[in-house]
Amino acid sequence: ISSKLPNTGTTIFSVMSALANEYKAVNLGQGFPDYPMNEALVAKVNEAMQAGFNQYAPMQGYLPLREVLAEKVHFLYGTTINPDTQITITPGGTYGIYTSLTTVLQPGDEVIIFEPAYDSYVPNVLVNGAIPILIELKFPDYKIDWEEVRRKITPRTKFIMLNTPHNPTGAVLGESDVRQLRSIVEGTNIFILSDEVYEHLIYDNIPHQSILRYPDLLERSFVTFSFGKLYHCTGWKMGYCISSPALMQEFRKVHQYNCFSCHTPSQVALAGFLKDKDSYLQLSGFMQAKRDYFHRLMSGTRFSPMPSYGSYFQCYQYDRISEEGDADFAVRITKEFGVATVPVSAFYQSGRDHKVIRFCFAKKEETLEMAVERLVKV
Ligand code: GLN
């Protein structure tokens, strides 16, 4: 058959989760919480179903949900967003990214992607006939080399893709990154895709550099978010995208003929739940405690932590343990020691291997303890 993605395999998240299941390993690979989500939010979904919210939601999303999201954006970032024209509810963050790219990419367009990159980005670009222009983040702190970005801009550059807090490394953008970005895109037709699904998972009181803080940049941006990350319900596949009115109008043309609209009862539930600001403000502290707990436990192993400021991932180097490549190493510790992780080389098209593996710490304390009891033996 003629494949649109001949060199693309099965996503590493499915591969490592399957291996974890096969070997009954503790799964710190694929990013998802193993503790229950908030019961009050579950109750609200039930209430919405019982109240009869079981038919199609509006294509752009349930209006009260978009309204409360606009309030949240204003409260957090001081920017006024029109809920009618600038927000669309999507089935997950990844879908928002795919749809944003598909909305504007033409065959032959170039898209700047920083690696390590979330594994959907490159296939999303390729399936649109566009060309990924790969730039490696500087190892080991995973900062953007803006001079290299300047060198790689061409008249065909259509998008710069950003992700802060960053999956898989937990790196975050600072104000100086935004200044560099602005000076590069000013006066060009370059769009920005800003993947901010870990918006609230940022630690040590560092402010999240959302594109939503900068109305001039938002004019040319698609910014994607995830309720799965916000409320510990990755299986809901719910998120949203924010853009300028003009771009959002185009986004909706693609969206309406793909999934059309999203699960109605959860939108009704989320609209009610989001009114309580604590429902999102407490998340950073909650997850930082998990990160710190995991750090403390891991200090008893031979793994060396990499700097991480956000997301629910923590990368570790294992150079004191083994010289194996990271993919082999990750498979071996799943099979032999019963802990699944994700090798960071999977986030590079080149397979660049700095011998780093990613752990997800969005887990119950007992899960983290069980994992580390095994990892001390590695
Ligand atoms: N975002 C999650 C991760 O990085 C996984 C999402 C998925 O499995 N598609 O682990």
Image (spheres, rainbow, N blue to C red):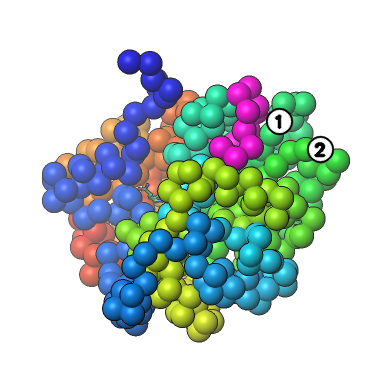
The quarter of the picture where residue 360 lies is bottom left
Q: Residue at x 45, y 79 (%)?
A: 273
Residue extending farthest to the top is: 1
- What residue appears at the point 79 percent right and 48 percent down from the top-left corner? 182
Is ligand 1 within 8 Å of the beta carbon of the residue shown at mark 2?
no
User: Looking at the figure, which quarter contains the N terminus?
Assistant: top left
Which x, y percent locates residue 331?
24, 38
Residue 188: mark: 2
110 falls in the magenta region: yes
- Left or right: 209 as drawn, with respect to 352: right
- Placement of 142 over or under 9, stated as above or below: below
Q: Is residue 333 magenta?
A: no
Q: Which residue is drawn at 34% across and 68% down?
A: 54
Ligand 1 has an atom within 8 Å of the beta carbon of the residue at disc 1: no
User: How many numbered marks, from 0 up?
Assistant: 2
**Image check: 9 left or right of 57?**
left
Q: Residue at x 47, y 32 (%)?
A: 123
Give the farthest residue toward the left: 23
Q: In the image, residue 87 lies at what x, y percent? A: 60, 60
Give the amino acid at mark 1: Thr
Q: Do the residues labelled 1 and 2 touch (CB within 8 Å)?
A: yes
Q: Is 303 left, or right, of 118 in this rendering?
A: left
Identify the residue under disc 1. Answer: 157
Instruction: Decide which of 327, 132 is in the foreground and name it.
Output: 132
Q: Of the residues shown, which amino acid type is indicated by label 2?
A: Thr
The residue carrying pointer 2 sits among few (fewer than 14), some (14 to 19) or many (20 or more) residues within 10 Å by Cα, namely few
Residue 150 found in image quarter: top right
